[in-house]
Amino acid sequence: MKKIVKFDDSKIIRDSLQYNCKPGGNNSILGNALLKEQKSFCAYSEEFIDITSDSNDIEHFNPDLKCTPQDSYKNWFKTKNKVNFKKRLKELEFNKKGISFNDVLHPCENDFEDRLQYIKGEYRFKENTDDTKLSNLINLLDLNLPEKIERRKLYINRKKREIENFGLSKEDFFKMLISDDVSGIKYLRSIQEEFNLNIWEMIPETN
């Protein structure tokens, strides 16, 4: 999982967009702005969100802030509905255990990727550290479920074989993949670390 970048000049800030808490309230403008900033990728699963086929939500990272005066741009992310649903189940577990969301590493923290180490499909602690906030994040988003680790590994290994079969450089291969079908890109942090590529900068902004 990559750090999620929020922008000082975001349309959401410029236009003072707020989450509409009314039942059935229209949040399409806010949702579209978040999706554009995330280049149509789910904040947590790093899978492409196809708006024609993927149910998706505006996710409030800290649910305790939802529809309060403290709720704001940095608490809002676009996610796939299935990912958001699973996170909500974890939120119930956290509440039962008395775990505060102040004790969960926020995806926008400057040192996010330094603390959340990626090693061969798995997310780990920085060596010789005991990071409670990071541990809670990994638990909250189920980042290290065995099936998720395996899917990342399979994806990376498949891309390595495809690069070899195409006879392209890693840069040219991913440029081709992005140009042909950007939805074929997933697991951005895995690509970044395994191929030493700034894949995020290679992906164009969505309209």
Image: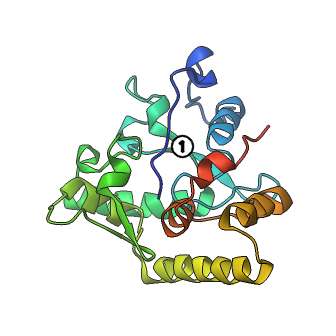
How dense is the environment of label 1, judged by Cα within 10 Å: few (below 14), some, or many (20 and up)? many
Q: Residue at x 51, y 60 (%)?
A: 189
Relative to 53, is 66 above or below?
above
Of residues 72 and 6, the one nearer the viewer is: 6
Residue 47, image x, y percentages = 63, 62
The quarter in which the C terminus is drawn is: top right
The amino acid type of the residue labelled 1 equals: Phe
Residue 115, image x, y percentages = 29, 55
Relative to 175, is 60 above or below?
above
Q: Which residue is mark 1?
A: 77
Q: Residue at x 55, y 19 (%)?
A: 13
Q: Using residue 196 as the reference point, say whether residue 62 is left or right of it.
A: left
Relative to 107, is 93 above or below?
below
Instruction: State how the image is colored.
Output: rainbow
Q: Name the quadrant containing residue 49.
A: bottom right
Q: Residue at x 38, y 43 (%)?
A: 62
Of residues 107 and 205, the one nearer the viewer is: 205
Of residues 97 and 149, the one nearer the viewer is: 149
Residue 87, image x, y percentages = 45, 60
Of residues 195 and 85, the one nearer the viewer is: 195
Q: Using residue 189 as the reference point, say whether residue 156 is left or right of it.
A: right
Q: Helix, strand, or loop for circle 1?
A: strand
Relative to 92, is 29 above or below?
above
> Is residue 197 visible to us here?
yes
Q: Name the quadrant containing residue 29.
A: top right
Q: Using residue 101 as the reference point, say whether residue 60 is left or right of it.
A: right
Q: Using residue 198 as the reference point, say whether residue 122 is left or right of it.
A: left
> Is residue 98 visible to us here?
no
Residue 203, image x, y percentages = 69, 49
